[in-house]
Amino acid sequence: MTTPVTIPVSDAPDQPARTPELEALYQGFESELLVPLWTEIGDLMPPEPRSKAQAHVWQWKNLYALAEQAGDLVPVGRGGERRAIALANPGLGGRPFATPTLWAAIQYLNPGEDAPVHRHTQHAFRFVVEGEGVWTVVNGDPVAMRRGDFLPQAGWNWHGHHNITDRPMAWIDGLDIPFQYATDATFFQFGPDEVETREAPERSRSERLWAHPGLRPLTRIAPTGVGTPLLAYRWEHTDRALTDQLELEAEGHPVTLEPGHAAIRYTDPRDGSDVLPTIRAEFHRLAPGTRTAPAREVGSSVHQVFDGIAEITVGARTWQVARGDLFVVPSWQPFTAATEGGADFFRFSDTPVFERLGLDRDIRFTQQED
């Protein structure tokens, strides 16, 4: 059944009077599924981005409690595939999307459980805010997951998870599901029911080959496909990099993004590009007593508090956030963070999409302009 087209009554300036002749013309447009631009331009081409997504905060303690209940009630296996609970932005009509382009969820795995093997075109990552003991196995390469680790995985790679401990574990998944869904680009395939590797080394094969700073291996096996070949970015390296930035700043070297604000971006060790084609991942550390300058950018982002307590302001709304809490910054809404005792944030965004399309734009105001 064809959905009828309705031409709205526009309140834009210089609209023609709704005469019987014009109504007949509009009825002709509707019968042929046509819409004149002059009645829609204010909605389709606004002066600046007007995201349907809303700024919102999800508290980790509530997410984790519900994930624990799901662990008791919901099995992992074919059909559901993952015990993953997605963040549903209140402005997106109940869809399980954190933003119009980004998906985020808490995934929970009980002791001894397998999350079965599959692959999909969506680019994905896992970020661990607490716990350890789960191995993710990507194309047969077992990769340990521990607090503070960032584990990217480009699309169309076989992967499953296995909890080798006697304790449950939860982490955050991030994917570009909404983007690929909107563009009709998604493919999905099932793999084995069980994860093939039951034991794993301290370091994965990808780490042994690619996790040496500044060194690119010259091997007979060239990495194929898109996305970083390094499957784990370990917390000790992230922590050291941020600590060094703030220590250099304290020594009089202005190396930080802004006073008291250290930041790093996870990159592909081959060329320094983003780890995934559609997702940018960063880690930010605010020293005690820091307030960031208001900033806004085209594109949306999701943040998780890794440690500390902070006050965040997104648009006209302000919240206090603590360890594990997640929040969304929609496109072109100003964002500020402030902390008295210091705070760490993991952040991921859709910026690479807009950069490739030439649509990226960002503004960072000085404190004096605020």
Image (cartoon, grey):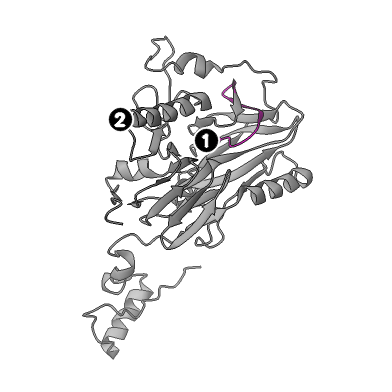
Q: Which mark is residue 249?
A: none
Number of residues whose C-alpha sits closer than 10 Å to that of mark 1, classed few (under 14), some (14–19) or many (20 or more): many
Element type at marker 1?
strand
Above-or-below relation of 309 to 16: above
* Amino acid type shown at disc 2: Gly
Main SS, magenta region, reads strand
Towards the viewer: 140 or 282: 282
Q: In the picture provided, is 87 more to the left or to the right than 81?
A: left
Would you name the residue on which mark 2 appears? 252
Residue at image position (37%, 22%) is 270
Q: Position of residue 340 (x, y in %)?
A: 48, 46
Which x, y percent locates residue 262? 39, 36
* Foreground pick, 209 / 9: 209
Contact check, label 1 and label 2, Cβ < 8 Å? no
Q: Residues within 10 Å of mark 2 (few under 14, many from 20)?
A: few
Please check the rendered image and state whether residue 135 is part of the magenta-colored stretch, yes or no: yes
- Horizontal side of residue 77 vs 293, given as left or right: right
Which residue ends up furthest to the bottom in the rendered image?
20
